[in-house]
Amino acid sequence: MKNISEYNHLIEKELAIYKLDSGKILEKFERKFNKGSLVAIHHFNNASPELIGMVRTELEEAGFKPELIGNKPGGHITLRVSLLKSTSRVA
């Protein structure tokens, strides 16, 4: 069996794809908030747990409180971010 370091090119390639995909999702949230929306939602269908975790971590590091909702048949998960919950305000 090969040493794991020989597989680094595969890991780097997959991470580059995740970063590109997560960037698109984060831009979608930013566009919605810039238009005045208080809540932004993204639907994941059969997405890898790594991609979902990466997006969630980036949102948390930016100060948001993302919520993951459901794991419906077919791997459907909804990521919801509320500006009100993120700022700890009560409506």
Image (cartoon, rainbow, N blue to C red):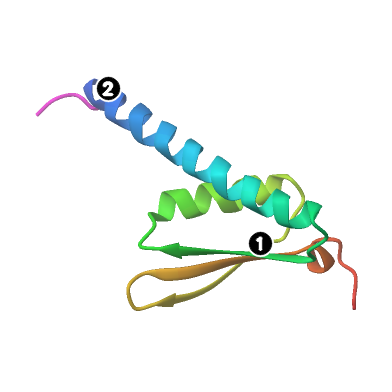
Label at residue 16? none
Q: How many marks overall?
A: 2
Q: Nearer the viewer, mark 2 or mark 1?
A: 1
Could you tell me residue 85's position as x and y percent?
80, 68
Q: Please, is residue 56 above or below residue 81 in the view?
A: above
Q: Quadrant of the C terminus?
A: bottom right
- Badge 1 is on which residue? 66
Q: Is residue 22 magenta?
A: no
Q: Please, is residue 58 above or below residue 71 in the view?
A: above
Q: Residue at x 80, y 51 (%)?
A: 34
Q: Residue at x 83, y 60 (%)?
A: 36
Q: Residue at x 9, y 29 (%)?
A: 1
Could you tell me residue 52's position as x and y percent?
49, 54
Q: Residue at x 37, y 27 (%)?
A: 12
Could you tell me residue 27's position as x and y percent?
64, 45
Stretch in magenta: 1-5
Label at residue 5? 2
**Residue 11, quarter of the rendered image:** top left
Could you tell me residue 67's position as x and y percent?
63, 67
Amino acid type assigned to the residue bearing label 2 in the image: Ser
Contact (Cβ within 8 Å) of mark 2 with mark 1: no
Residue positioned most to the left: 1
Q: Residues within 10 Å of mark 1 (few under 14, many from 20)?
A: many
Most common secondary structure along the magenta stretch: loop
**Residue 75, quarter of the rendered image:** bottom left
Say left or right for 86 vs 72.
right
Sequence-wise first label, 2 or 1: 2
Nearer to me, 77 or 53:
77
